[in-house]
Amino acid sequence: MNLRLWLAGLDPLVLNLATFALLALEGAGIPGVPGVVPMLAQVASIDAGHTSLGAAITWGVLGNWLGSLLGYAVSRWGGRWLPAHWRDRLGGDRATALLARYGAPLVVVSRTIGSLRTPVTLVAGSSGYPFPRYAFLSFLGALLHVGVWQTVLWKAGPAILPQMGRWGREILIGVAVVVVLLVVFRWWRNRTPESSSPSI
């Protein structure tokens, strides 16, 4: 099946909700969430005439922004449930001073750079960085992140999407090989002590 045609055939409402949800998880600072996947799906939907670039950006920005606010809220008001050594690392005068000095650019840029997104979000909440300021800056960051990436992917979509099917097959083959190797290794490791133990 042609991946581009399949993506173009997705229900626009389902695609928009999936974009919102995945970018909210990404925005909250959860590592490993593939925010680029719904953006690529939006490219196919835009090209098929089922949605517009503006709508795709709007859903993505709102999801990423809501996620950043949820991550902040969990760190600020739910931090007491975190392990003590995490609280010690996240809070304190150093984090407060860092955000006071570089807070605005850090919050904005962290929306785009994954390695900064989680620590900046959590430190902002745990150190008591002002919520209205954080909300405004994280909105700007989400607008910049999603707006630029969605536009770039839309412009480059015709070159990227045909490769996705091949990439997907190669990734699946690689994952299957790794899983088989892990299963064989675990089986061998579990058998080794039994076979090497002296019989009674």
Image (tube, rainbow, N blue to C red):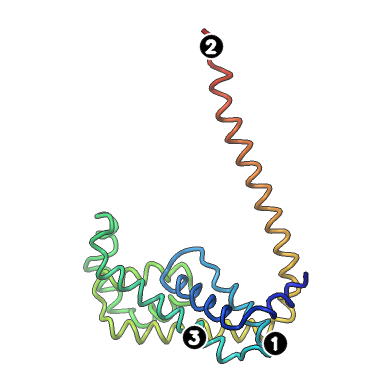
Label 1 Cα crowd, 10 Å radius (few <14 / some 14-19 / many 20+): some
Q: Position of residue 187 (x, y in %)?
A: 60, 32
Query: What label sits on residue 6 in the rendered view?
Result: none
Q: Position of residue 126 (x, y in %)?
A: 26, 69
Q: Quarter-wise, where is residue 103 in the image?
A: bottom left
Q: Is residue 175 left or right of residue 54?
A: right
Q: Position of residue 150 (x, y in %)?
A: 58, 83
**Residue positioned 64% across, 36% down in the render:** 184
User: What amino acid is found at the position of numbered circle 3 in the picture?
Assistant: Leu
Q: Which residue is mark 3?
A: 144
Q: Position of residue 43 (x, y in %)?
A: 65, 82
**Helix, strand or loop under label 2:** loop
User: What amino acid is found at the position of numbered circle 2 in the picture?
Assistant: Pro
Label 3 Cα crowd, 10 Å radius (few <14 / some 14-19 / many 20+): some
Q: How far apart, in angstroms, are the residues tagged by discs 3 and 1?
A: 22 Å
Q: Which residue is mark 1?
A: 47
Q: Which residue is mark 2?
A: 198
Q: Is residue 174 left or right of residue 97?
A: right
Sequence-wise first label, 1 or 2 = 1
Q: How far apart, in angstroms, are the residues tagged by discs 1 and 2?
A: 68 Å
**Residue positioned 51% across, 7% down in the render:** 200
Q: Is residue 37 left or right of residue 74?
A: right
Dots 3, 2 in contact, CB < 8 A: no
Examine the rendered structure and indicate whether residue 79 appears above or below residue 149: above
